[in-house]
Amino acid sequence: MGKIEKILFMGSKNLGLSVLKTIFCLTPEKLLGVLTFDDSNDGLRSKYDEFRAFCLENNIDFFVAKNKKQSKAIITSLQPDLCFCSGWYWIVDDDLLESVPFGFVGIHNSLLPKYRGSAPLYYAIMDGQSTVGASIFQLTSDVDKGDIWWQTSINVPEKFYIGEILYELKQKIVDDLKEYWLKFVNGELIPEKQDESLASYGTVRFPVDGKINWNKNAKEIDRFIRVLSRPYSGAYTSSNEHPDSIIIIWESEVVENEGKVYGTPGQIYKIDTDNSVIVVCGENSLLRIISVSLADNQYFQNKQSISTEPRNLIKKHCVRFF
């Protein structure tokens, strides 16, 4: 692999912005421009304004594609040596992959070949993995099958929230990017092929998949709530009195020392002195609900909800979740 001179950054979101800033800091002379899309409707996860401001401040050519076809035209006109992607969601056509001399390199939030496809962090954490990571790899026509340039990993603590995992992983990705980037662009790294015998895949997840199944034990539900918490949409439930309302649960913890409690999964066991609510789960286990929001059925479209203490919610609603 020879030296790379013209690099087009393609991406979005918080990680993408950090990666862009790192690449610009290390090799500003090689950055041909930034290609993104307007994801302002993605609420707090969007960094569109920050991307635009950074490029304006540093005199970087800034391109906004309205669709996949337009993005392809922009890439073709710029003729980069390499396209580096982080937070890019449109599939790159085979002819475009082949037209860029050093191809497309992307970041996938798993230790490939495990957890290829969608929602890799979710599947890895729910699978009980104590270590998660990211792979910097070559994009090919097959999803997440390209050669790996390098990988990075972090430990998953017993008590975590996904926002903390995302932050720690982002910091580690940036740190390792600083270590490997110059070697990469100067052609000093050799990628490794993936071991197909270790491959696994994650399917696309939808908002309805965030519904809590109270028949599972408290440890499983707690992990589910933590992995779907902010900046994501949150795990949710409903109440038997107001089944059309959506109750988003942001924070929880397993109750260990309450003794054995019998009840129907989803039933409120008690309201504690700190205004948290303890709920019966499967296998007679207990889960403390610490932070919640209330929303209507349009929540997954408008992402609007009203934060309240669990105790207040129970006063207004009912004694059983489902």
Image: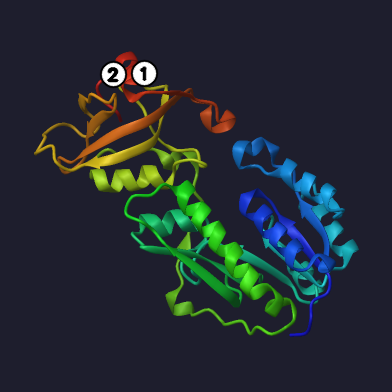
Image quadrant holding the N terminus, namely bottom right
Residue drawn at the location 11% of the way across and 34% of the way down: 262
Q: Which amino acid does label 2 sit on?
A: Cys
Image quadrant holding the C terminus, namely top left
Q: How does the figure colour the protein chain or chains?
A: rainbow
Dot 2, crowdedness within 10 Å: few (<14), some or many (≥20)? some
Question: Which one is in front in this view, the residue at disc 2 or the one at disc 1?
Answer: 2
Helix, strand or loop at mark 2: loop
Helix, strand or loop at mark 1: loop
Mark 2 lies on residue:
318
Residue drawn at the location 47% of the way across and 56% of the way down: 121
Question: Given the current orientation, which residue lies at the most extreme top position?
Answer: 316
Mark 1 lies on residue:
242
Measured from the top left, where is residue 21 in percent x and y? 71, 57
Measured from the top left, where is residue 162 in percent x and y? 45, 48
Measured from the top left, where is residue 95 in percent x and y? 78, 69
Q: In this view, does 312 lie to the left or right of 297?
A: left
> Can the viewer see residue 24 in this picture?
yes
Q: Is residue 7 above or below residue 250?
A: below
Q: In this view, does 46 lie above or below 118?
A: above
Residue drawn at the location 34% of the way across and 18% of the way down: 312
In the figure, residue 155 lies in which quadrant?
A: bottom left
Sooner in the amino-acid sequence: mark 2 or mark 1:
1
Q: Is residue 132 left or right of residue 239?
A: right
Dot 1, crowdedness within 10 Å: few (<14), some or many (≥20)? few
Residue drawn at the location 33% of the way across and 59% of the way down: 128
Mark 2–mark 1 distance (CA, rounded to whole Å): 8 Å
Q: Do the residues labelled 2 and 1 touch (CB within 8 Å)?
A: yes
Q: Is residue 182 left or right of residue 213?
A: right
